[in-house]
Image (cartoon, helix red, strand yellow):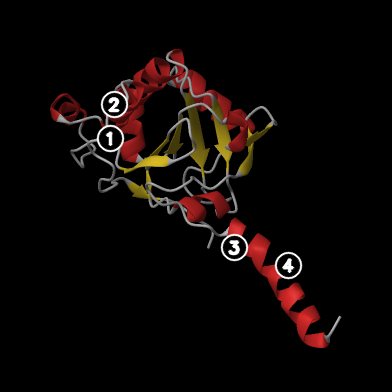
Amino acid sequence: MSLRTLALTTALTLAAPFSAAFAAATVGAAAPDFSLTDANGKTQTLSQYKGKTVVLEWNNPGCPFVQKHYSSGNIPKQQADATKDGVIWLTINSGAGGKQGHLDAAGAKAFIVQYQASPTAYLFDGDGKVGHLYGAKTTPHMYVIDAGGTLRYVGGIDSIASADKEDLAKATQYVPLVLAELKDGKPVSVATSEPYGCSVKYGS
């Protein structure tokens, strides 16, 4: 093997995993796989739910916007309705250690009990790799992935950027809308929206 061929082979070998690891999440494209540990100490991957519709919800329990949607029962109801219908709901915390909203396993379990939440799993992304991969900016920031693994929705949880519970009744709740359209085989009417909430508290 010539030095030129060896160099090219080495470059391709190094480039392949880098490209896969840093493939950005884009609506209409395959959602990038990831692996995170949940509050029960189990490893959760996106690929293990192939064939299922998946919702990703970025979470920070200390954020007033998150508190609005949990204390009102809005997100817990969406979780319950979705999971009852066979949807996988993964709540992700990308808060770095020492930052607002960072939780350990016990804290995550307590949060779930406090608000009678029912995600499929609560996942920890303390180094922020998955959050950056998906471009998560706020808490909450919502993503819907269809059963074929295609990212179909990215954006806010609803249409009114507010921490006021009274606005919930007037807002369009995007995730239930998208889930209903996917279930009925209809085109997704709102594929993106502007996320709102607290900034994700990344370490870097």
How far apart are the two marked residues, 4 and 3, measured between alpha carbons?
A: 11 Å
Residue count near mark 3 (Cα–Cα under 10 Å), binned few <14, some 14–19, many ≥20: few
Which x, y percent locates residue 114?
46, 20
Local secondary structure at mark 4 = helix
Query: Which quadrant, please, contains the N terminus?
Result: bottom right
Residue at numbered disc 3: 19
Going 42% across and 15% down the picture, which residue do you hit?
A: 85
Relative image position of residue 38 (x, y in whole percent): 62, 33
SS of the residue under disc 1: loop
Q: Which residue is mark 2?
A: 181
**Could you say which disc has been placed on residue 13 in the image?**
4
Left or right of 2? Residue 51 is left
Q: Which sits earlier in the primary sequence, circle 2 or circle 1? A: 2
| Left or right: 132 in relation to 43 | left
Q: Which residue is mark 1?
A: 188
User: Sequence order check: which comes first, mark 1 or mark 3?
Assistant: 3
The one of 143 and 15 positioned closer to us in this rendering? 15
Residue 144 left/right relative to 162: right
- Graded by Cα atoms within 10 Å as few (under 14), some (14 to 19) or many (20 or more), the crowding at tag 4 reads few
At mark 2, the secondary structure is helix
Q: Is residue 61 visible?
A: no
Residue 109: image quadrant is top right
Cα distance in 3D space between marks 2 and 4: 41 Å
Q: N-terminal of the two: label 1 or label 4?
A: 4
Label 2 with label 1: CB-CB less than 8 Å: yes
Q: Amino acid at mark 1?
A: Val
